[in-house]
Image: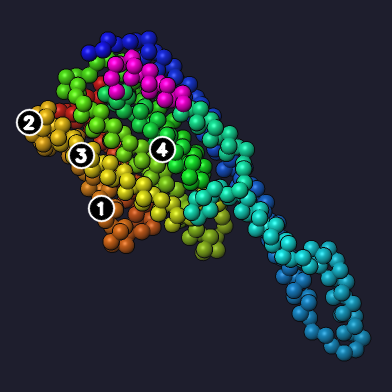
Amino acid sequence: MYPINETMGQYSELFMLLAAGTYTVAFIAFAWDLARSSRALRAVDLKAAAAAEASAGAEASAKVPATAGAGAAGRGDRLEGHLAGPAGRAERPSSSVSAKVQGGVAAGRTADASMNYSGERRAPARVAVALTVLGAAIHAAAVLTRAIGAGRVPWGNMYEFLTTGAFVAVAVFLVVLIRRDLRFLGTFVVGLVIIMLVAASVAYWTPVGHLVPALQSYWLVIHVSIAVLSSALFTLTFAMSALQLVQSHRQKAIAAGGADKLGFMRLVPTALSLENLSYRINAIAFIGWTFTLMFGAIWAEKAWGRFWGWDTKEVWTFVIWVVYAGYLHARATRGWTGTRAAWLSIVGYLCVVFNFTIVNQFFNGLHSYSGL
């Protein structure tokens, strides 16, 4: 057993505090990007509406039938004067106006329907991503120094599981960001990570220490590492499902002729695009959770001589597996799409949170290793 290095543990806490501060500034930058881009898109809308109104007026005037006589000549003079006026000059090159408007809309978007990168470069978004990368680097140092201080993997209790899980969530977000333009998701992912770090420091803080004998096994590395990765992926899909519900409500309101009260959601892809990506990530996370359940059973047989004992933690791990299995099956075969699929994904993540918090804290059992 390696000796405990309390100094490295103190460094870890300092790095964790710095990471939380950096994430907070990144969160503000992501939120600023949403607000600023929303205002820019609204200005484009106003220009497009003005151009469309002027174009409609010009076309209506051009369709006025010509009649004989002085009255017709007078109307013709008025029509010619109208087309020579400001509105006429603005609408004569209608194709160029349309191109400018369409170009403005395209430039203001964060991602298209397939979430591929567009040609635009927004300063607040670039700053937010850079700060998130910096925060992740500091966060990695915090997790690493915690592991060195404890002389083991840094997920032996609730504090370590939560801080390591938050780091993995950010790391997965940044990796996916290389191929898909998910900057619209930055506010929500970074916000969840900040909540996780604050909860870890305030409610679940545990000093560096050795593990109980039952956890001193190589299965801790295998079983819990997969659980951490799966939980991080579920965190991303939770954010996407929540955005999907908001976007779906917004799209229905606009289709019904209502006002767009959530302008910042224009930077978010359609509800269907969010649902499709969430489904793919949930499928990967479900495979990981399946291995978590399997390896946990094997570890239980090694430690306690049985694969399954209806311990509270075991039951809720299985409940989570059933919820996400139902989600994948219902969406793939039963046509559960749209808001129903989003709600089922959210329920699955709430089960993950319940399993991690309530079960660990208030239910005694063989898995009561929270460190509290």
Cβ–Cβ below 8 Å for labels 3 and 4?
A: no
Q: For this rendering, which residue is in front, 333 or 254?
A: 333
Mark nearer the N terminus (2 vs 1)? 2
* Distance Cα–Cα, label 1 vs label 4: 25 Å
Residue found at the far left of this picture: 305
The residue at the point 48 percent across, 45 percent down is: 179
Q: Which residue is mark 2?
A: 305
Q: Give the main secondary structure, helix, strand or loop, of the magenta stretch.
A: helix
Rendered image: mark on residue 172: 4
Kindly identify which residue carries mark 3: 293
The residue under label 2 is which amino acid type?
Gly
Numbered marks: total:
4
Image quadrant for the C terminus? top left
Q: State the separation of the CA atoms marked 3 and 1.
A: 16 Å
Number of the label disc, if any, that sits on residue 326: 1
- Distance between the Cα atoms at labels 2 and 4? 36 Å
Camera sees residue 250 = no
**Marks 2 and 1 in Cβ contact (< 8 Å):** no
Q: Amino acid at mark 4?
A: Val
Residue range (magenta):
137-153
State the image coordinates of residue 304 (x, y, percent, origin top left): 9, 29
In the rendered image, which quarter is residue 75 located in? bottom right
